[in-house]
Image (cartoon, rainbow, N blue to C red):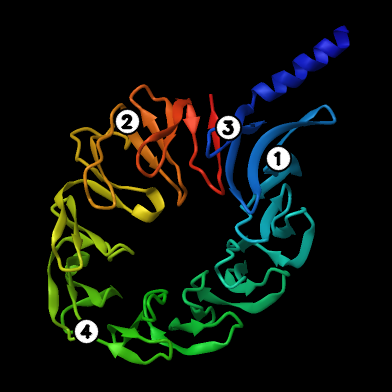
């Protein structure tokens, strides 16, 4: 008995020198417990699996690493990995301790043979089943079977937008950029000498021709150029331009090269999917619509504006002292830009594209609201992560 006791003491003494497991509870959208697990930290569920980082006792020794748990709380891939990606597709990259390269695995943990890559991107279901990989600093792409379908000879964008990726040959002296498709075919010649990558949105992409930024279509034809400034992007029939040095003097022109919104802003972010843009003057931010009308006043230090993802807009007031977002004075707005009356709410954490908005009350208890800002899961937790795939992690 004494030997067993000493062994236990030694084991826990070893554990005390590193991060300790904590008890995490996985809940559903009704706040019901699905399972609990002991881990150092946990990640969101993707395709039914979540990365967990934990200490595991193996042969009387503590092993600390990443692994995967399923929605039943079962560890389906052991937590002995140095790194593990989320399963944002049917495959994911992992890295083992002592190895300098990544391995590709399926959801059962089976290794899919690939070449040895020193750096990898992330597989996304929406990204044409292609993933960027790197050898000797040069980029290529593999498919979900591990085949190198585009050889590692490029630099440039690690993702495809509207079916195309902006790349330049790594061997190029001038760094001429163009666009390739998912099969590695050059669709738009590598002929644009510019500072970096571009990407297509709404069928248009920025490119540099004779030192001037223009908009091109998917055939590489120049479809718009301006005399008003340097093009930053285009949507809603408007083209954002900067007209002054130090990337200041933001405004928007139409495709007749006429100013629709005068270049009066120090900085701006292009219009989002709701047709709103955050603009800045003198370190204060506001929000405008596509007519240039100010719809949130220019009085905030920061504005978060993704109603589809988060469930709200948030304007954060400037503070005299450095303070956290949680403690800063804030206004919250709904989709109609009406201020949301929130009682006993310290801050909102977002909905992560789901039905539930994580929040903290004034006493730092964490819970969840629905998208009508009604409490559906009381703030009984010390920590609460956002929902993904209908599940969330909480700690008491």
Look at discs 2 and 1 and give the one toward the viewer: 1
Look at discs 4 and 1 and give the one toward the viewer: 1
Q: Gap in Å between the C-alphas at discs 3 and 2?
A: 24 Å
- Which of marks 3 and 4 precedes in the sequence? 3
Kindly identify the residue that appears in the image at 47 percent across and 74 percent down.
161
Residue pointed to by mark 2: 346
Residue pointed to by mark 3: 32
Seen in the picture, residue 84 relative to 262 is either above or below; the reply is: above
- Which of marks 1 and 2 precedes in the sequence? 1
The image shows residue 296 at horizontal and vertical percentages of 17, 52
- Which of marks 4 and 2 precedes in the sequence? 4
Kindly identify the residue that appears in the image at 70 percent across and 37 percent down.
73
- Which of marks 2 and 3 precedes in the sequence? 3
Residue pointed to by mark 1: 72
The image shows residue 381 at horizontal and vertical percentages of 49, 26
Mark 4 in CB contact with mark 3 (< 8 angstroms): no
Kindly identify the residue that appears in the image at 38 percent across and 49 percent down.
310
């Amino acid at each position: 008995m004494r030997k067993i006791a000493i062994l236990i003491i030694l084991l826990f003494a070893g554990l005390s020198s590193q991060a300790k497991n904590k008890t995490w509870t996985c809940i559903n959208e009704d706040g019901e417990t699905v399972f609990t697990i002991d881990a150092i930290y946990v990640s969101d569920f993707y395709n039914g699996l979540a990365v967990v980082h934990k200490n595991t006792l193996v042969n009387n020794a503590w092993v600390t690493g990443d692994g995967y748990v399923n929605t039943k709380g079962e560890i389906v891939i052991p937590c002995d990995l140095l790194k593990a990606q989320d399963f944002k597709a049917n495959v994911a990259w992992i890295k083992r301790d002592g190895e300098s390269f990544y391995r590709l695995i399926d959801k059962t943990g089976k290794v899919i043979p690939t070449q040895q890559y020193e750096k990898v991107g992330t597989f996304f279901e929406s990204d044409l089943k292609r993933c960027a990989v790197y050898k000797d600093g040069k980029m290529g792409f593999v498919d979900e079977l591990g085949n190198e379908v585009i050889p590692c000879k490029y630099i440039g964008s690690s993702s495809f937008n509207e079916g195309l990726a902006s790349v330049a040959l790594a061997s190029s002296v001038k760094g001429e950029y163009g666009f390739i498709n998912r099969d590695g075919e050059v669709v738009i010649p590598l002929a644009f000498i510019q500072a970096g990558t571009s990407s297509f949105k709404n069928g248009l992409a920025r490119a540099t021709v004779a030192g001037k930024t223009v908009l091109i279509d998917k055939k590489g034809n120049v479809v718009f150029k301006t005399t008003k400034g340097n093009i930053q992007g285009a949507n809603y029939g408007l083209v954002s331009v900067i007209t002054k040095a130090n990337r200041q003097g933001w405004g928007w022109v139409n495709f007749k090269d006429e100013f629709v919104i005068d270049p009066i802003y120090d900085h701006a972010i292009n219009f989002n999917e709701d047709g709103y843009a955050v603009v800045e003057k003198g370190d204060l931010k506001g929000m405008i619509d596509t007519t240039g009308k100010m719809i949130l006043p220019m009085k905030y230090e920061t504005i978060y504006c993704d109603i589809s993802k988060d469930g709200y807009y948030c304007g954060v007031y400037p503070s005299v002292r450095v303070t956290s977002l949680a403690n800063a004075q804030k206004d919250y707005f709904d989709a109609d830009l009406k201020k949301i009356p929130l009682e006993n709410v310290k801050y909102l954490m977002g909905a992560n594209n789901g039905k539930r908005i994580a929040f903290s009350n004034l006493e730092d208890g964490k819970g969840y609201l629905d998208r009508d800002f009604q409490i559906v899961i009381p703030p009984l937790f010390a920590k609460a992560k956002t929902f993904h795939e209908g599940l969330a992690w909480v700690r008491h």
